[in-house]
Amino acid sequence: MTQMIETQNPPSTIEPPQHLPTTTNPTNPQKNHKLTLIPLIFLIYFEVAGGPYGEEPAVKAAGPLLAILGFLIFPFIWSVPEALITAELSTTFPGNGGFVIWADKAFGPFWGSLMGSWKFLTGVINIASFPVLCISYLEEIFPVLDSGVPRKLAILGSTLFLSLVNYTGLTIVGYVAVALGVISLAPFIIMSLIAIPKIHPHRWLSLGQKGVKKDWNLFFNTLFWNLNFWDNVSTMAGEVENPRKTFPLALFSSVVFTCLGYIIPLMAVTGAVDVDQRDWDTGFMANAAEMISGKWLKFWIEIGAVLSTIGLFEAQLSSSAFQILGMAEIAFLPKFFGLRSKWFNTPWVGIVLSTTISLGMSYMDFQDIISSANFLYSLGMLLEFASFLWLRRKFPLIKRPYRVPMRLPLLVIMCLIPCGFLVFIMAIATKLVYLISGLMTIGGIGWYFLMKFCKSKKLLKFNDKVDDTYVE
């Protein structure tokens, strides 16, 4: 893993001429402020995690030992391979289209478009979950938000306000993410330190209470939801300063940062607090903080949860909005979808579209939101792993500023392990999730043929797609 930040290329390889499909084409260069390393690290952190908020159901589903093992092992079989692939492909194809470009270059425009549909829908479903998670913590302070009209208004108001913040610019969002990350993680660091004298290590070995049935669907979906989306930042590659060097280092730092942010508080609380396993619902960390130190720390964690969900929301909305812009710039969507704000140079059409769809999803059951996002994301990731392997075979001589230091057979093995998990996640989904995901996939296929028809009949204006074929 330490090699992730190094530039890798076989010394004997003669590199061919190339034209990278960069999609950075701002309408106002003066306002084109690029993301630097530290804000990018925190944006990736919020794309993936945002803190230990939301990891509690893993304990409820399978007990302390399996939850701890899950957050220790899962990053190595899932997060690390995904981050490595993102580092290689984002530096080889540094454009706002991200994974859409990868699938298009590997298998053609149909698969590029379908990848865009799956990932965009995953993104907006994920966006919808953050206000719900935020309100789940706030209702501990304000019980009126538990249900009914106040809850619905709180979700609506928070979604619209945070979308407005996103409109002010990616650079601002990046530095806001840094501040939010520091403030929201601080109470967990304090709680973990205070908990040390109260920890009983034997509690870590518990497989769960007698009489509490293990919920494998909830367990694996919680792990997956808390440790995925490493590739989402690829849609902002065109907005990053020197992406070929910055991306690998930012991804490596974020992997370490995220894993420690989950496992340390989880071990502290499971070791120090003895409660009914069924109490480990989303938001339980705040109650645990009160048991360990007092109400002041509970209040801080609840405020931190609100700040964390703001960071999660902003990072995911940025990714989805720039994906729409990138798809318009490479002619997968009409030019209109690539419009930027005259004041902030942000993709305002992408922001409005993402916000509108996510609002419609916000009133679904929280677990259904997570499961639907995971299923669509699994489909997209299977295509992404296949694209990565096929691009290695199809273009073996392209200059790769960062190259995963393995040959193709080992890369296949590296990808097979997470692919097996993806298939498992889809296999344990509920009938409702199958229905939602199936309808959305059919919609994505229909959208591709609609855009193809509009382009052939010149019903809508599209950008001219640049011929960026690699010559070998």
Image (cartoon, rainbow, N blue to C red):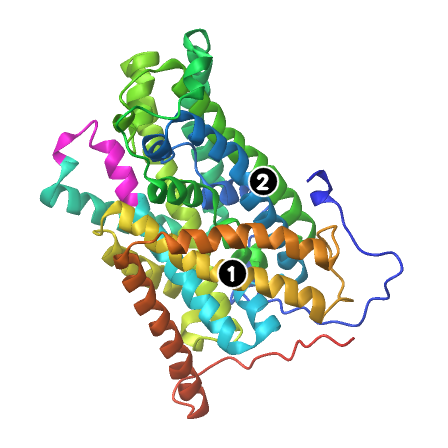
Name the residue that disc number 1 marks: 382
In the rendered view of the protein, which quadrant contains the C terminus?
bottom right
Q: Residue furthest right?
A: 12
Q: CA distance from mark 2 to mark 1?
A: 18 Å
- Residue placed most toward the observer, 62 or 458: 62
Between 179 and 121, the residue placed more toward the observer is 121
Height in image: 149 above or below 12?
above
| Residue visible at 39% across and 20% down in the picture | 270
Amino acid identity at mark 1: Leu
Q: Is residue 295 magenta?
A: no
SS at badge 2: helix
Position in image of residue 132 (x %, y %): 26, 43
Q: Left or right: where does residue 259 sit relative to residue 224?
A: right
- Quadrant assignment, res 452: bottom left
In percent of the image, x 50 and y 40: which residue is there? 45
Which residue is drawn at the image coordinates 45% and 71% (left, top)? Answer: 114
Q: Quadrant of the N terminus?
A: top right
| Residue farthest along the front direction in this orientation | 211
Element on which disc 1 rests: helix
Q: Which badge, 2 or 1, comes first in the chain's sequence?
A: 2
- Examine the image and state in which quarter residue 451 appears: bottom left
Relative to 195, does residue 364 appear above or below in the rendering?
Answer: below
- Which residue ends up furthest to the bottom in the rendered image? 457
Q: Residue at x 52, y 67 (%)?
A: 100
Q: Which residue is mark 2?
A: 76
Pinpoint residue 90: horizontal percent, then vertical percent: 62, 57
Question: In this view of the protein, which residue sits in the foreground, 189 or 162?
Answer: 189
Residue 335, given in percent of the width and then of the height, sits at 45, 76
Residue stretch in magenta = 131-144
